[in-house]
Image (spheres, rainbow, N blue to C red):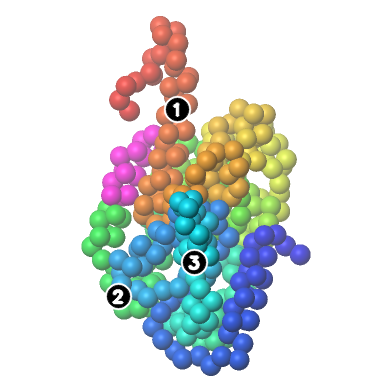
Amino acid sequence: HGSHVNGYDNMLEGILSHLWQGRERTPGESINIIPGFDGYCVGNNRELKRMLDLMGVAHTILPDPSDVYDTPSDGQFRMYDGGTTIEGGKAAQDAKATLSLQEYCSKKSLQLAKAQGHEVASFHYPLGVKATDEFLTKVSELTGKPIPEALLKERGRLVDALADSMNIVHGKSFAVYGDPDFVTGMARFLMEIGAEPKHLLATNGTKPWAKKLRATLEESPYGAGGQVWPGADLWHLRSLMFTEPVDFLIGNSHGKYLERDTGTPLIRLTFPIFDRHHHHRFPTWGYQGGLQVLVRILDKILDGLDAASDQAGVNDISFDLTR
């Protein structure tokens, strides 16, 4: 029953239960991070570790495919390069806390951690300023480590970037589809940059997820007209594109068929991205990840403006060199 989201949780709970069975916990100060099912785990896990290292926080990523997925093909045999070791997985039982970055990927795993005596908390895909603030603030509260100046500067750069480009994104409407945590995180980021998430769809989303997301939408005037569609599929979204159209789609490669059928431009984010290369190597989480996603959205909007004004002397009133 369920989808890959539930399968990820069952897998991780099974691994940790096996590693921790018969072992006595010795409480420590390290924290565990459960990223959840994430097609960008290569870029995102490295970004997580970089931020936590800047804070001086001891941590274990459960699990950590980064460096394993993209080990360089340089003639040197490695089994395995990077990742979290079995011993590291066992020692994770001693952690002070376990944090999940995708709540709907980790309910059973967090219950297991809580039963061990860990403090637990969960988030919904930490993309953008506020979502990253929430994650880093929780880490700081748990560890007593301050958020360093280097990360505060990164935050400031992202805020400046949002301010610089808000006039481009403001008022644009979006349909977002994907896993529940991604859709929630993406909707929050869109509202943060002045865009309007109009249709939010997760085929593996539940009614409680939808209720929680609707409450989030109501917190912003940009989300006031948004609709949430739990359990619906892309055929459903295709109909909505005709009856209640939006300016842009955000989701995985499967959306290219909706782009072809409805003419709605697709911005490729989340899993799976089969028809473009190397997206997984760049983060979408944290302040740096937020900047990556912002640029992805802006490029699609501005490419569309150029394409719509590409005939000299006919429609090139907006074929601007500087935007």
Identify which residue is drawn at 58% across, 85% down: 20
Was residue 305 drawn as part of the magenta stretch in this picture? no
Q: Which mark is residue 303?
A: 1
Q: Secondary structure at mark 3?
A: loop
The x, y position of residue 145, in whole percent, is 30, 75
**Image-quadrant location for residue 109:** bottom right
Image location of residue 63, percent across then percent down: 53, 68
Element under disc 1: helix
Q: Is residue 102 above or below residue 279?
A: below
In the image, what residue occupies the spot 36% across and 62% down?
50
Find residue 83 and name its label. Answer: 3
Label 3 to label 2: alpha-carbon separation: 25 Å
Q: Is residue 208 visible?
A: no
Q: Nearer the viewer, residue 37 or 311?
A: 37
**Residue neighbourhood size for the residue with mark 1, other residues' Cα within 10 Å, grouped as few (<14), some (14–19), many (≥20):** few
Picture coordinates of residue 141, whole percent (x, y): 35, 76
Amino acid type at mark 2: Lys
Numbered range of the magenta stretch: 157-170
Q: Position of residue 177 (x, y in %)?
A: 61, 47
Answer above or below: position of 320 versus 270: above
Predominant secondary structure in magenta? helix
309 with respect to 105 (left or right): left
Q: CA distance from mark 3 to mark 1?
A: 38 Å
Circle 2: element type: loop
Q: Which residue is mark 2?
A: 145
In the rendered image, which quarter contains the N terminus?
bottom right
Amino acid type of the residue that numbered disc 1 sits on in the rendered structure: Asp
* Residue with the most extreme top position: 313
- Report the residue at 45% width, 27% height from top: 303
For residue 150, above or below residue 302: below
- Image quadrant occupied by the C terminus: top left
Q: How many numbered markers are drawn?
A: 3
